[in-house]
Amino acid sequence: MQTDLPPNTYAADCPTRQILDRIADKWAVLILQLLADEPQRFNALRRKIQGLSQKVLSQTLKTLERDGFVTRTAFPTVPVTVEYALTPLGASLAETLTPLSRWAEAHIKDVEAARAAFDHRRATSGEGVPQGQTESHAPVAL
Amino acid sequence: MQTDLPPNTYAADCPTRQILDRIADKWAVLILQLLADEPQRFNALRRKIQGLSQKVLSQTLKTLERDGFVTRTAFPTVPVTVEYALTPLGASLAETLTPLSRWAEAHIKDVEAARAAFDHRRATSGEGVPQGQTESHAPVAL
DNA sequence: CGGGATCCATGTGGATACTG
DNA sequence: CAGTATCCACATGGATCCCG
C-alpha cells in the first residue's frame, strides 16, 4: 500500500487511462472527426481514410459503438446499407479532439524542424567532446 | 493524382496525421502530463507510470525528444543522472492535451454505462425480431 | 454493400542480461 | 542510475474468401 494518488492517477486501473487509451487510437480520432462532419457509410469512411483496412475499420467502429460514441444503423435495402453517426457523447468527444488537430496543423513545421535537427545531430557524431548541453550542475540527491 | 483535399486531409502523407499518430501514443500522453508538473528523472517516470516498461519508456522519450517535445539533460555525476523536461513546444502540446484528460474523467461513467448496455445486448441475443433501430428508410443512392 | 472468418507477416512490447 | 542489446511471445493488422 503506497501513498495513494487520488486526483488523476497513472495507475493501470485508473478509468481515465482507459479513455485515453481509446483516444490513443489514431484511427478512432480520424473516424470521429469525419463523422462529426456528417454521418457516413462504411465504405465511405474506408475510402476517405487512406491506409485503413476494412478489418481495422470494422473493429474500430465496433469499439466506438460499444463505448457509446457512434451508432450503427442498418437499412434493409437490397445491398444492405449501414450508416454510422456520432452520438451526443461522441460529438462531445469530437469537439474536445478538435483543438488537437488544430494544434497539430499549427505546429507540424516546428516538429519537422526538431526532427531534422535531431537527425542531423546524430549524423554529425564524431566530434571530440559533443557535450551539447550537459551542464555541470549540482548532483541531485538520491 | 486524385482530387487532392487541401484543408485537413485524411491521406497517409498528411503531416497532421503524423502528429496525431504521436499523440495517439498512450504512454506519450501520460509522460507529457507528468513532465508538465515538473521535470523528472528516468526512473521517476518509470515508477509513476504503472505498467510502463523501461524499454518502452526509453523509446517513447527518444521520439518525444526527436519531435522536440522534451529535452534530455545528463549530469555527469557518479551514477549518471538524467533529467527530462518539457520544451516550450511540449508544454504547449501538454496544455492542449489537458482538456482531453478532463473530458475522460468527466465522461468515464457514460462510457462504462454504454459498454455495459452494449455487452448486455449481445448477451441477450435470442429474441424473435431484434430490430432495435433498423429504420425503413429510403435506399441510399449508389 | 457491409462485414465475419481465416491465415499469415510483421511489429510491438516484456523479460533478462550487460555496460557506462 | 540510465540506458542498450538480445531473445522471444503475443497482439495487431493486412490479404483473401465468403456470406447475408
Image (cartoon, coloured by chain):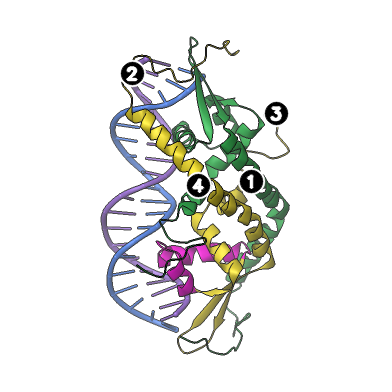
Chain colours: A yellow, B green, C purple, D blue
Query: Which residue position is annotated with label 1?
Result: B96
Q: Nearer the viewer, mark 3 or mark 2?
A: 2
Residue at x-position 66% and y-position 39%: A9
Asked whether A66 falls inside the magenta stretch, the response is: yes
With D7 as the anchor, is A118 left or right in this view?
right
Report helix, strand or loop for mark 4.
Answer: helix
Mark 1 → mark 4, Cα distance in angstroms = 14 Å
Query: Relative to D2, is B6 above or below?
Result: below
Query: Which residue position is annotated with label 3?
Result: A3
Mark 4 → mark 3, Cα distance in angstroms = 39 Å
Of the numbered discs in the image, which one, if any, rests on residue A123?
Answer: none
Mark 3 → mark 1, Cα distance in angstroms = 29 Å
Q: Are dots 1 and 4 in contact, CB under 8 Å?
A: no
Chain identity of mark 3: A
Three-letter residue code for mark 2: Glu
Report helix, strand or loop for mark 2.
Answer: loop
| Tags 2 and 1 on a common chain | no
| Tags 4 and 2 on a common chain | yes
Asked whether B13 falls inside the magenta stretch, the response is: no
Three-letter residue code for mark 3: Thr
Bounds of the magenta segment: A42-69
Location of the N terminus of chain B by quadrant is: bottom left
- Residue A12 can be seen in this image: no
Query: Which residue position is annotated with label 2?
Result: A127
Three-letter residue code for mark 4: Ile
Q: Quadrant of residue D17?
A: bottom left
Residue at x-position 61% and y-position 67%: A36
Residue at x-position 52% and y-position 78%: A82
Residue at x-position 49% and y-position 58%: A27
Residue sitting nearer the eye, B90 or A19:
B90
Query: Which residue position is annotated with label 4?
Result: A108
